[in-house]
Amino acid sequence: MTIFKDQRGMSLIEVMMAILLLGVAIIPLFNLFEVSNTYTAVARHNVAALNFAQEIMEEVKGMPYGQIGVAKGGDNDQITLADETGSKNFKNYLIILTAGTGMGQVRKITEYATDIRVATIDPPWDTGKNPDDNSTYLIGKEDSIECGSWQIGQATGGGTSTIMLAGYENNSNNLYQGYKVKISGGKGQWQVRKVTDYNGSTKVATVEKNWDTTPDSTSFYQLYRYPYTIEVKSPVNNLKKITVSVSYKVKEGEKKVELTTEKLNR
């Protein structure tokens, strides 16, 4: 039998050094993967937010010229619309303040004086948040603001973790899954929840966390994928400058995309 006296294995210290060197080499790779995933997620949100902003812009551009503008002021339960509003009677229409003072409030117009362009709303504006000459508003059509990628309406009821949307909402199951629903007026105002399930036949949206205050048929809601604002400048030569901003959260805080266009009075 031949004995090789020079055969040696790795010592414990050598094994530990090899593991240490391997760890030192792998850690940067893990960091690289983490950074890459972060940038990929940000890019994905950026594209989705940009697409959402574009959808909003196209829908706003298609609205009647007189139904989006800058308020001339307001008080507890009224708002004075812009000079270029026209003579249309907006009784029973929904109105949302999309930028400026009072932003985010949705109300129903219960009376409208076409000669002085004063709309009476219900319920009253929040205390200290009456619209003024910095408030941008948008008026939908009677009883609703249907805008495809973002919806505004009056609820028909609610439960501990549900809200029953308006009857005109889409019939497709789970269409609004992943959307945010914000109560923007009436009972339960300013609560925001993520939609986890939507039944298109019953118009019932289930939210991921129980309501603090259960919405009911007095509650107005917004459905959206990302928070947004729509700002309008008073018209110059029949042109209104419109800016749509959409924000999304990232690890460092929040990012925003903006689109600007002009709307001509035709």
Image (spheres, helix red, strand yellow):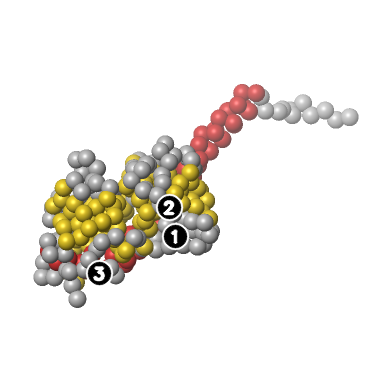
Image coordinates for residue 3, horizontal then vertical, percent? 82, 28
Image coordinates for residue 116, horizontal then vertical, percent? 12, 61
Relative to 200, residue 25 above or below = above
Amino acid type of disc 1? Gly
Amino acid type of disc 3? Pro
Q: Are marks 3 and 1 in contact (CB under 8 Å)?
A: no
User: Can you see residue 52?
Assistant: no
- Label 2 crowd bin: few (<14), some (14–19), many (20+), radius 10 Å: some
Which is more toward the observer, 112 or 83?
112
Give the secondary structure at mark 2.
Answer: loop
Q: Which residue is mark 3?
A: 64
Amino acid type of disc 2? Thr
Q: Which mark is residue 81?
A: none
Q: Which mark is residue 167?
A: 1
Which is more toward the observer, 218 or 10?
218
Q: Are marks 2 and 3 in contact (CB under 8 Å)?
A: no
Give the secondary structure at mark 1.
Answer: loop
Q: Which mark is residue 156?
A: 2
Q: Are marks 1 and 2 in contact (CB under 8 Å)?
A: yes
Relative to 211, residue 144 above or below = below
Identify the residue at image location x=20%, y=57%: 119
Tell me where residue 142 sits by quadrant. Answer: bottom left
Q: Is residue 235 left or right of residue 43?
A: left
